[in-house]
Amino acid sequence: MLGKYVSHNTVIPTYIIDAIIFAHSIFKHEVIYRVLEYRVERITEDLLVNRAMVNGTTNQAHDWYTRWNNYLEPREASLPVLQEQVKSYCSGVVTLDEIKTTMLTSFPNDAINGFLERV
């Protein structure tokens, strides 16, 4: 029911995350992998959309482009690392803690971070 109104950018309140974790207690490796895989797909899509918007926009002040590029470039550079980490997590080569570190460092405001810090 609520799923129709929650997007991949929705920040779920801490108390709801805590309730979900309490109800499930332990998330299987495969479930966490699927969550991460979905998140990487959404991050990729958002970066592509935002890059196309910046590249297709004209007549903005120079600092507008600078701010957007300062936002996009480090995330675009970090995305291949995150993608590889998630693939490697599936096979057990990379730990969830390594992915958490990448997310907090490269995507600090991402909606998934609240969930990741609790699992």
Image (spheres, rainbow, N blue to C red):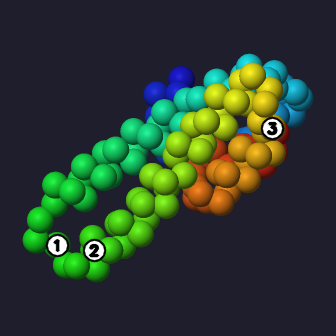
Q: Is residue 34 above or below residue 72?
A: above
Residue 43 shown left or right of residue 118 in the figure: left
Residue identifier under label 1: 60
Kind of residue at badge 2: Trp
Categorize mark 2 by other alpha carbons within 10 Å: few (<14), some (14-19), many (20+): few
**Sequence-first disc among 3 and 1:** 1
Q: Position of residue 49 (x, y in %)?
A: 31, 45
Q: Position of residue 29 (x, y in %)?
A: 79, 23
Kind of residue at badge 1: Gln
Residue mark closest to the camera, 3 vs 1: 3
Q: Is residue 73 above or below residue 70?
A: above
Find residue 95 and name its label.
3
* Residue at image point 46% right, 28% down: 4
Image quadrant occupied by the N terminus = top right
- Real-space Cα distance between discs 3 and 1? 42 Å
Residue identifier under label 2: 64
Categorize mark 3 by other alpha carbons within 10 Å: few (<14), some (14-19), many (20+): some
Q: Are marks 2 and 1 in contact (CB under 8 Å)?
A: yes
- Real-space Cα distance between discs 2 and 1? 6 Å
Residue 1 is at least partly visible in this image? yes
From the viewer's side, name the closer residue of 77 and 103.
77
Image quadrant occupied by the C terminus = top right
Indicate the quadrant where residue 105 lies: bottom right
Residue 18 is at least partly visible in this image? no
* Residue at image point 49% right, 61% down: 74
Q: Residue furthest left?
A: 59
Q: Position of residue 92 (x, y in %)?
A: 80, 26
